[in-house]
Amino acid sequence: MPGTFDEFVAERLDQLLRYATALTCDPHLAKDVVQEVLLRAQQHWRRIEKTDQPMAYVRRMIVNEYLSWRRRRVNRDVMLAHAQLTDISPTIDDLTSRYDERQAMLGRIVRLPRKQRAAIVLRYYENLTDQEIAAALGCAEATVRSYVSRALATLRADVTRPAPKGGLHHAV
Amino acid sequence: MPSDLETLIREVLTEQAERAPHRTAVLAGMRWGTRRPYRRLAMVAAGVAVVLAAIGIPVGLHLTSHPQQPAIPPSPVLAARPADIPIPYRVTWVPAGYVASMRAGSPPTVPTGMLLQYWEPRGDDRATTDPSSSSPYIDFRYSRLASNAGLGQAQGAQDVSVNGATGKLTHDTSSRANDGKALDKAYLWWEPSTGIALSVTVVNVPDPIDVAIRVARSVVSGGVGIPQALTFGDLPANYYVDYLQINGTSPTDFTVTRIALEHGSGLSHYTATWSTSEPSLTHQTAVTVRGKPGWFGQLPLEPTEWGVAVKLDAGHWLAVWSQPPDGSPVATPAAVVPIANGMSIYPDGSLDWLGH
C-alpha cells in the first residue's frame, strides 16, 4: 500500500484518470476533476492515509467532485473519438452494428441521472460491491440497488426510442 | 454469468477509460496549485475582513445567530454588493447575434478555481440550462492551474498565433451532445503568461475554427467580473464559499447559484439559488423562510440533498439546500432555514450584462 502522497500518486494516478474518464466520459473534465481532487487530497493526506483505504477515499472524492454543482456546466457533451474506438474494436464481421450498439449505449449512459451513472460506473467499471458503492456515494446499500436497477432499466431500453427531453432543473 | 447488457456496459465504460488523459497534464497542473498554500489565503481573507470591518462596511448583513431575535430579513436585501469576482481577461468580439448568457467561477481564494463565460444566440438559453442540448455556444475559460503539458496529447492540434502566444487548435466533428446530435467543435487553448491558461471553445457555430481564432485574438486584459449578486451570511464552521454562477437570457430571466463547500474533502455543500424560476425542490413540509411561507423538500433524484425554498417579494425565488457531511443525517429545516435567512441578495442592476 502506498505510504506518502507522492507514492500514492505515482502508483494510482493512471488508474484514477481512467476511472474519472469512464465516469465523466470526457477526458478534459476527467483531468480537471482528478487534478482538483488530488490537490485537496495532498493538503489532507495525513488524515486520508490513516483511513483503511486511501484509494477508496480518493475515489469517493472523485465521485463527489463529478457530482458537484460546478462540474455540471462543463459536463454537457460526450466526445466519441472514432479513431480510438476503432483502434480498440475487434475486427469482426459485425463491426459496424457493434459500434452502433456501443454508441447508442454510450448515449444512454451519459443521459442517466448523475448518481445512477456513478453507480453504474462503480459497479461495472470498478467492479465494486453494493457496500463499497454505498460508501463511495454516501448512501445506503438499498439506495445503490435502486440506482443500479433504475439505470439498468433505462439502459435496457430500445435504442430506437427517442431520447427524453429536458435537462437540468433550473435550480439543480 | 454477465448478461449481454452488462457486457455491453463494461465495453463502453472500458472504451471511455481508454481515452483518459496522460498523467503529465495532471502533474503539471498540480505543480501550479501547490504554489498557493491555504494558510496564506486564509490570512489574506482574514485581513480583508478586518479592513472591511474597520472602515465600516458590513461583512455580514444578517445577524441570524442572535438567540433572542430570530432573523427574518426583508427580501430582497439592499446593501453594498461585495466586489465582483474578477475575470482577468476579457473577450471583445463574438459573432453578431451572440449574447452573454453565463459567467461563473470561484473567487481568487480558491486556488483551483476556473472562470467561465458563455455566449449564445440571442434569446436562446438552452446551452446553459440544458446539458443535453446541442445548441450553439461560445465558451471562454480562464484557469490558474492548467498547463500546456496536456496540449501535447491532443492529436492533430495545429499551432495558432494568439496575440504573441502559441495556441493549440483542434477541430472535432465526431462529438455528440447528450441529445445524440452531432457537435462541430473548435477548441483553442493558449498560455498568455506562465501559469495561466485561456481557452475558447466554439460549438455548432458556423465556421467554428475562424470564430475561435477571432474570439481568442480579441481577448484583452481586465475589465470583466462575476457580480456577487448572492452571498452567504453565517455558515457552519468548516465551510467556505466557493462557486458562483449567473446564467440567463436577460436581467428578468436569470438564475444565480452560490455554493459553499466543506473544507477538506469538499464532499458536503450548501447550495443557494436566486432565480426568476420556481426551484424544483419537492414540497414536503411548510416552513417560514425570511418571514414568508416557504417549503422544505428534496432535490429530485438526490436523496441526500434537502433544503428550503421561498418566493420573494419581487416575484423571485430563493432556494437553499445541503448535502450533509459524511455519515451525517440529511439536512433539517432547522439547519437550512437560518442559511436561507442569512443570504444576501443584491438586485442592483448587476445582471444587466445578461443578454448583451
Image: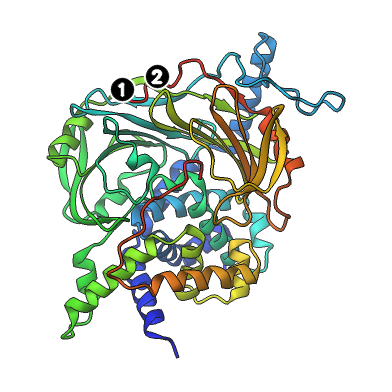
Figure check: B28 above or below A89: above
Q: Residues within 10 Å of mark 2 (few under 14, many from 20)?
A: few
> Which chain contains the residue that carries disc 2?
B
Of all residues, the one furthest to the bottom in this rendering is: B1
Figure check: A112 above or below B138: below
What residue sits 19% from the left and 52% below the top? B172
Point out residue B59 in the picture as x, y percentages from the top left corner: 66, 19
**Badge 2 is on which residue?**
B352
Secondary structure state at the residue bearing disc 2:
loop
Residue B356: numbered disc = 1
Residue A35: numbered disc = none
Figure check: B307 above or below A106: above
Of all residues, the one furthest to the right in this rendering is: B68
The answer to whether residue A3 is visible is no
Residue B135 left/right relative to B66:
left
Q: Are marks 2 and 1 in contact (CB under 8 Å)?
A: yes
> Which chain contains the residue that carries disc 1?
B
Amino acid type at image mark 2: Asp
Viewer-nearest residue: B298 or B182: B298
